Amino acid sequence: MEKPKLFKKDVFGVSKVNDKKKKKRIGGCFTVILLVLFVVFGAGIFLWNFYNDSIYTKVDLHGKSIQIEVLEGETLISIIPSLMQSGLIKNEEAFRIYLRLNNISPNIKFGQYTISENVNAIELIEMLEKGVSSPDTKLTIKEGLRISQIGDVIKNALPSESKFSITEFNSITSNPDNVDFSGEVKEFLQRHKPVKASLEGFLFPDTYFLNANLTTKEIVEKMVQNFSLKLGQEINLESLNLSQNNVQNIYQAIILGSIVEKEASGTDDKELISGVLHNRLTDSYLLQSDATINYITGKNDPGVEIADTQIDSPFNTYKYTGLPPGPINNPGIASIKVAFYPKQTDYYFFFHDSSGNTHYSVTYYEHNQKLDLYM
């Protein structure tokens, strides 16, 4: 008996349907595989970039120096947590992977290290292998020093083989607009320093650790970077007190702060002396600051000679009203801050006696009486 042709037709039909399902399954699996490969590839790129950044990109010390101590018998592996905590490496695991991949087990030297330059992981390992061959010089710059004085302090503190040059220092600080500073320093100076002004007032007084290998420009940058950092930390630049009207920007505050730095015999005097100077500025009185005269003459005497007050200079506050054209030294943050926030007072006069006490007066008559009494 002949089989119906319809049966064969059904068989071919079923076969074609199964082929289509198989093709759909294969296509779906291929899509999933592509998606997985894409995710794995993307994750691989991310991890590779993260690894490279952790190892090859320099950490930013923000102008600070970091001290670490390697004890005798310690290894690079054992100090990894402390390196991470101090901010000298970016990621512990990436650092360990770098050592394993490159089969590195360096023989680091024990000692006290001061890291004052931005370094990456490889450079850090090289420093620890080399050991402490050129220790940093601890240097304290006092508040109220002029640029010329700061240059001498640095020159006398650093060893003779250092890269510091007093001639280059004077050139950089006198004509900073001609210097190719780093982006951060350049931006800060462009925002707050008038064109053609020197760096007087911008070399922040603080304790520094200077390596003999630092160039003169790098030392200057370190001091300006430190000023930018401390200024932002100590003064809210977004909500400055401009209602006093005499100080309307950072540069004017540095100028007035530099006068306060020299005129104040102590911290307690700063707010009050700033209040006296603001009163004189408001009423267009001569500031008559001996400190500005000494800036002109270069003297460091507590008082001034009458002849010096006759010198024709825009810094002579015995001849010209208002603020002088620039700072007369490099003041600390406290002196700059009181320039924005003076103590309200009725005083217009003050002087220091031989014991360092400050005497304030409202009128010139009262001022002369106290001079006769205490001087």
Image: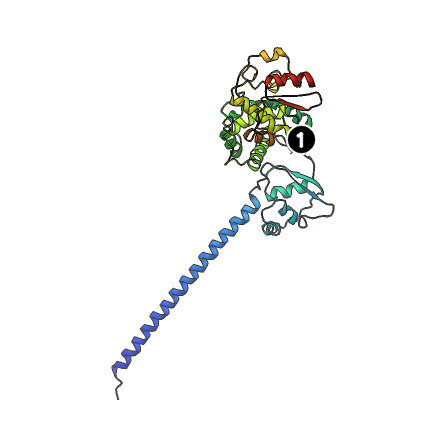
**Picture quarter with the C terminus:** top right
Q: Height in image: 182 above or below 174?
A: below
- The part of the image, by quadrant, that contains residue 89 is top right
- Judge by depth and name the residue closer to the eye, 225 or 347: 347
Residue 153 relative to residue 244: left or right: right
Query: Which amino acid type is shown beneath numbered disc 1?
Result: Thr
Q: Is residue 41 visible?
A: yes
Q: Residue 170: where, in percent of width, then height?
A: 59, 22
Q: Is residue 48 left or right of residue 304?
A: left
Residue at which label 1 appears: 140
Q: Residues within 10 Å of mark 1 (few under 14, many from 20)?
A: some
In which quadrant will I find the N terminus?
A: bottom left
- As drawn, the residue found furthest toward the right would be 72
Q: What is the x, y in percent for residue 313?
A: 55, 15
Residue depicted at x 32% and y 73%: 17
Residue that extends furthest to the bottom in the rendered view of this protein: 1
Q: How many marks?
A: 1
Does residue 29 lie above or below 71 as drawn? below
The spot of residue 142 in percent (x, y) is 65, 28
Q: Which residue is painted at 55% across and 25% down in the image?
A: 278
Look at 53% across and 49% down and name the residue there: 50
Residue 215 visible in the displayed image: no
